[in-house]
Image: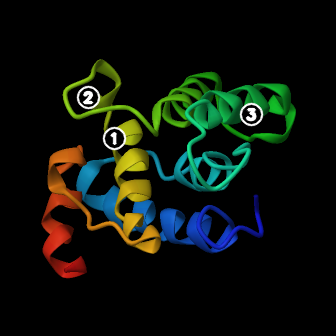
């Protein structure tokens, strides 16, 4: 998928930039964001409906734990962020963690790449919601 025009390297780069730019306002762990950006879509089967790609990305990260330089708690947050990034909605328990919420918003702020408009109802952080008007 890294060559995908919608879910590949360019998207992963934008997710990283989004996440790192949100982090000073959200308090997210900036060590986790780059890993999330690179891993969250790495196990997609295709460009369309693939509801299990997040959990597969989490499994991939677990399989390659030795390559990921995070402590155990940071790694736990990374796994939660990858596994839940597609279907999580504001108000879910994981969304109350600043790092997970920032990762999810970093991804959702790049939804315009597939022709959709960012809808603040699906964002988790005030910092991301404040950026919606910059994207329109």
Q: Earlier in the sequence, mark 3 or mark 1?
A: 3
Residue at mark 3 to residue at mark 1: CA–CA distance: 19 Å
For residue 85, above or below residue 33: above
Query: Label 1 near label 2: C-beta < 8 Å?
Result: yes
Residue at 26% from the left image edge and 63% from the top image edge: 118
The image position of residue 45, as x and y in percent, is 74, 44
Compared across the picture, whether 100 is left or right of 42 comes to left
Residue at 84% from the left image edge and 33% from the top image edge: 64
Location of the C terminus by quadrant is bottom left
Compared across the picture, whether 25 is left or right of 2 comes to left
Q: Which mark is residue 60?
A: none
Q: Secondary structure at mark 3?
A: helix
Q: Residue furthest top?
A: 93
Residue 65 figure quarter: top right
Residue 3 figure quarter: bottom right
Residue pointed to by mark 2: 96
Q: Nearer the viewer, residue 5 or 104?
A: 5
The image position of residue 55, as x and y in percent, is 62, 27
Residue pointed to by mark 3: 61
Residue pointed to by mark 1: 101
Residue at mark 3 to residue at mark 2: CA–CA distance: 22 Å
The image position of residue 41, as x and y in percent, is 63, 49
Compared across the picture, whether 15 is left or right of 35 comes to left
């Amino acid at each position: 998928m890294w060559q995908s025009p919608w879910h590949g390297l360019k998207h992963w780069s934008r997710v990283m930039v989004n996440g790192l730019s949100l982090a000073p306002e959200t308090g997210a762990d900036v060590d986790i964001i780059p890993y999330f950006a690179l891993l969250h879509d790495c196990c997609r089967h295709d460009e369309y409906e693939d509801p299990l790609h997040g959990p597969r990305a989490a499994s991939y990260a677990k399989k390659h734990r030795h390559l990921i330089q995070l402590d155990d708690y940071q790694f736990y947050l990374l796994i939660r962020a990858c596994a839940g990034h597609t279907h999580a909605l504001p108000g879910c328990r994981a969304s109350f963690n600043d790092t997970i919420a920032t990762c999810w918003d970093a991804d959702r702020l790049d939804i315009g790449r597939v022709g959709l408009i960012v809808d603040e109802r699906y964002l988790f952080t005030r910092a991301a919601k404040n950026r919606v008007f910059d994207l329109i």
